[in-house]
Amino acid sequence: MSVRVFGLGGVPIEEAEGVRQALVDAGIEFYESPPGSRGVTRGTQGAAAAAIWIADDAADKARSEIDKFQQNWRRDARAKFSISAPQKPHPWAVPFRLLLIFFGMVIIMQLARVFW
């Protein structure tokens, strides 16, 4: 009997390829089911969604390999995001900006009342 170990619905192509490669490198045979008819079930967790299936006896090893890959994937994605996206202070965190926005809204409301 086969066990569904990894759902491919909503997964980036690079991550899915990485999971496949991790299983191949570990010597685990797997079957990949395609998404349901016309892709309607893509992104769901049902049996009709695209998924990677493993034989019962290799399911634990496959799950551990997938977990290792996802930990590395997550670490790399966070590192890439922190490098590419500089941290900016939230606009509401700066009190002067808050006051400017407030007075700007008051002026706009007064102008709207005059010209309305």
Image (tube, rainbow, N blue to C red):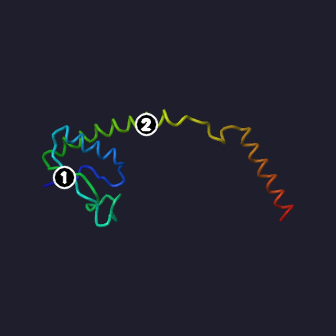
At x 79% / y 47%, what residue is drawn?
103
Write the residue at 20% across / 37% down: 25
State left or right for residue 17 relative to residue 59: right
Disc number for residue 78: 2
Q: Quadrant of residue 70?
A: top left
The N terminus - image quarter: bottom left
Q: Nearer the viewer, residue 115 or 102?
A: 115
Outermost residue toward the right in this view: 114
Q: Amino acid at mark 1?
A: Tyr
Viewer-proximal residue, 80 or 91? Answer: 80
The circle drawn on residue 31 is 1
Label 2 is placed on what type of residue?
Arg
Q: Earlier in the sequence, mark 2 or mark 1?
A: 1
Under tag 2, what secondary structure? Answer: helix
Instruction: Please indicate whether residue 41 sits to the left or right of residue 94 in the image.
Output: left
> Where in the figure is residue 96, as x and y percent of width and height?
74, 38
Mark 2 and mark 1 in contact? Answer it, CB < 8 Å.
no
**Relative to 93, 86 lies left or right:** left
* Coordinates of residue 109 in the picture (x, y in percent): 80, 57
Tell me which residue sits at (65%, 39%) in the image. Answer: 93
- Residue 82 placement (x, y as % from top left): 48, 34
